[in-house]
Image: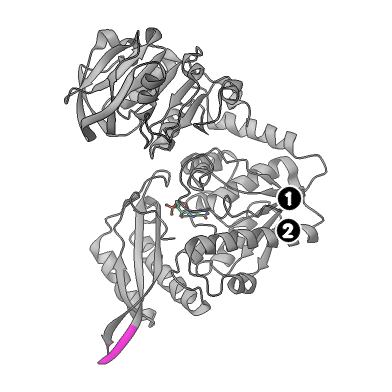
Amino acid sequence: MDKLEKSGGVVILDFGSQYTQLIARRIREFEVYSEILPWNSGKDRIFGLNPRGIILSGGPRSTAGPDAPQIDRSIITGGVPVLGICYGMQLIAHTLGGSVEKGRLGEYGRTRVIFDGEKGGKILKGVPGAADVWMSHWDEVKNLPEGAVRFGVSETGTCAAFSMDGGRITAFQFHPEVDTTEYGREMLSSFLFDICGCEPNWKLGGWVKRSLDSISSAVGPSERVICGISGGVDSTVAAVLVSKVVGDRLDCIFVDHGFMRKNEPEQVIEAYRKLSLRIRHVNAADRFLDAVKGVTNPEEKRKIIGELFVRVFEDEARRTGGAKWLLQGTIYPDVIESGFVGGDVIKSHHNVGGLPDDMEMSLLEPIRELFKDEVRRIGPLIGIPDELLRRHPFPGPGLAVRCLGSLERERLDILREADAIFIEEIRAAGLYDSIWQAFCVLLPVRSVGVAGDIRTYGETVALRAVASRDAMTAESVRLPWDLVDKAAKRICGEVPQVGRVVMDVTGKPPATIEWE
Ligand code: XMP
């Protein structure tokens, strides 16, 4: 996209905090554009984007440690407003001549902070003299840099907030981006609007227009685009956006990799008939199943499937007259979790980490900076029917990452049947639309049972239903017990290979939504 969305935006430097993405989200909720860059991006790249403000995220390291991420002091002193959060605060103190030490106690979770409204100035607009905030640190700022003003102190006596240069530099030991920080939104809002002078003008309608412009300047007038389309929200939105620019130079390929849910290929093709997209159904199930034969390692599965996807597209591109571009519905959490921003690789999303180096086509990823709920909100703006937008997210590698252990046809069929029953019961209870994602997982565990007086040694199915806003964090949904009970009985009754049904009640973190 344009230089930090035509320089109305804010750069977030990521030092590895689990909350970095949340900072980006919060800022976009204020209709201000933001982008996360790795902490070592360098001042030329950062200032080249002309940001209105720079936020230094939290992170797991100690500023004094040998492997501590450090930045050029001019990033802090260069005149652009800076907000340091947690490690970001300690880094400001450390870089500008203060001192940071390991604290006596450390602070984790909800902590009371006393604020000095007069010293705090603009950043404390609308914030009372004390608030409960979310802390997660061991180190603390012991001595402030020269000229710094402390305006917040925690109940354990730790420096919780300071500012410098008349409030241009602000530092919080706590996390204003986390929901459990009282007045966190107010403080972020003051930073953006009163200190950085941002305007709340990053509207999705405007985004669509700019996105269409940048697609049309990227894709040449005679170049063809090929797109893998799955029936999911992301690839559908990406395809419809691009089709508005390139028309029938876009070939949509629906690859049935053999890891689809029950009746999914037919349903997806039917839904796309209503959108004027050229679509080809490629049945590549044998090719995929052969490629993953005997593979049980989740990352290996993902890489093999990711690479094969691209090979299938390349074959199709040749068949359809040589596409220059491979269009993908990659969204921001895919980029973050695949470790492309600077954090740990959580899992290689098939459309990010799994691409082969020698790919023949160039990548087109128009929704790469968007979160899922933003993609959903764009759908109606470009004419996508609700039924496609409401579908639960489904990972690119499909049931391959929900069928733990080896991927034989028979086990995939068991999972397909069980999953269809669970979803049918959720729909019957009228809960489908209020749940972010629900599905079954087939575990690589057998257990002993008894059916009709005969000993059984059957497969185990886990039920999973999660609530989430953007898949970055999730909570297990408390499904009505009658629903769970009925689904479990039906699964064991109608899918005879299954001998046991269990329920996954883990949140994200510590788990992820998918099991692999
Ligand atoms: P996790 O399991 O990382 O998933 O908590 C977060 C969200 O992303 C979906 N997911 C994927 N989507 N390609 C995708 O397009 C993938 O490889 C992939 N892996 C996970 C997952 O279903 C959830 O909604």
Is 453 part of what is drawn in magenta? yes
Q: Residue at x 35, y 81 (%)?
A: 458
Disc 2 packing (10 Å; few <14; some 14–19; many ≥20): some
Sequence-wise, which precedes: disc 1 or disc 2? Answer: 2
Is there CB contact under 8 Å for labels 1 and 2? yes
Residue 192 can be seen, yes or no: no
**Mark-to-mark CA distance, 1 and 2:** 8 Å
> Callout 2: helix, strand or loop?
helix
Segment tinted magenta in the rendering: 451-457
The image position of residue 241, as x and y in percent, is 64, 42
Colouring used for the render: one colour
Quadrant location of the N terminus? top right
Is residue 94 depicted above or below 246 in this figure?
Answer: above
Foreground residue, 171 or 256?
Answer: 171
Q: Which mark is residue 314?
A: 2
Q: Residue at x 39, y 37 (%)?
A: 17
Task: Identify the amino acid type marked 1.
Answer: Met
Queried on whether the Cβ of the residue with tag 2 lies below 8 angstroms from ligand 1, the answer reads: no
Location of mark 1 (residue): 361
Query: With 275 as the anchor, is 20 left or right in this view?
Result: left
